[in-house]
Image (cartoon, rainbow, N blue to C red):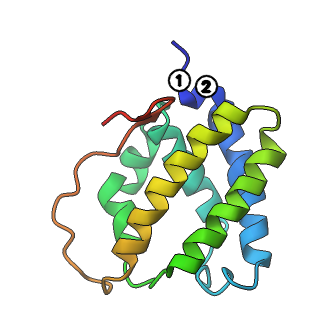
């Protein structure tokens, strides 16, 4: 069975997606302020996070602290629903550009991003330093949605 990771072209495909997406985000009037502390390393971090979630190498957990670290990075950002919706619009455009002609793959990816951005929005309402407890391992997403 082919993993979602393989369907998107592995880490290389996710780097292309992440790079093209954040070019849009940083040029977007609504989202640029949310990403005020953006660094070029963010593109790579997102790519390796997605690789792990989609069934690839567990590099994000090994190098960057896994699910807990990802959630912690969103604390205090105060992401509003309109930010989330705009993020999703830009991601849909980016998927259409970087992975054209794959409507089922697009739907699967957008389902993940809808799920994940809702969590990021909710976590972002808590101040920096909030104890998140133990959020568990990095979630896994496949062609049929959340695996674990």
Residue 99 visible to the viewer: yes
Residue drawn 42% across the image and 67% down it: 120
Quarter of the C terminus within the rendering: top left
Label 2: few (<14), some or many (≥20) within 10 Å? Answer: some
Residue extending farthest to the left is 133
Name which quarter of the figure residue 126 lies in.
bottom left
Total labels drawn: 2
Residue hosting label 1: 3
Q: Which mark is residue 40?
A: none
Position in image of residue 4 (x %, y %): 55, 29
Q: Looking at the image, is 147 positioned above or below residue 131?
A: above
Residue 41 visible to the viewer: no
Q: Looking at the image, is 92 positioned above or below residue 37?
A: above
Q: Looking at the image, is 107 positioned above or below residue 69?
A: above
Label 1: few (<14), some or many (≥20) within 10 Å? Answer: some
Q: Looking at the image, is 139 positioned above or below residue 9?
A: below
Q: Secondary structure at mark 2?
A: helix
From mark 1 to mark 2, how far is it between C-alphas?
A: 5 Å
Position in image of residue 74 (x %, y %): 42, 73
Name which quarter of the figure residue 53 lies in.
top left
State yes or no: discs 1 and 2 in contact (Cβ < 8 Å).
yes
Q: Secondary structure at mark 1?
A: loop
Residue drawn 72% across the image and 63% down it: 90
Apparent side of residue 57 relative to residue 9 in the rendered image (left or right): left
Q: Nearer the viewer, residue 12 or 144?
A: 144
Position in image of residue 105 (x %, y %): 65, 34
Name which quarter of the figure residue 106 lies in.
top right
Residue drawn 63% across the image and 67% down it: 87
Q: Which mark is residue 6?
A: 2
């Amino acid at each position: 069975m082919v993993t979602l990771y393989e369907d998107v072209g592995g880490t290389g495909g996710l780097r292309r997606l992440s790079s093209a997406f954040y070019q849009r985000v940083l040029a977007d009037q609504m989202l640029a302020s949310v990403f005020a502390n953006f660094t070029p390393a963010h593109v790579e971090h997102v790519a390796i996070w997605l690789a792990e979630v989609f069934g690839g190498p567990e590099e994000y957990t090994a190098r960057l602290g896994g699910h807990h670290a990802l959630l912690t990075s969103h604390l205090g950002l105060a992401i509003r629903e309109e930010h989330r919706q705009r993020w999703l619009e830009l991601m849909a455009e980016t998927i259409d550009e970087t992975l054209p002609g794959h409507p089922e793959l697009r739907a699967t990816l957008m389902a993940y991003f809808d799920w994940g951005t809702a969590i990021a929005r909710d976590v972002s309402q808590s101040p920096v330093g909030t104890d998140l407890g133990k959020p568990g391992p990095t979630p896994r997403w496949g062609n049929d949605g959340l695996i674990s």
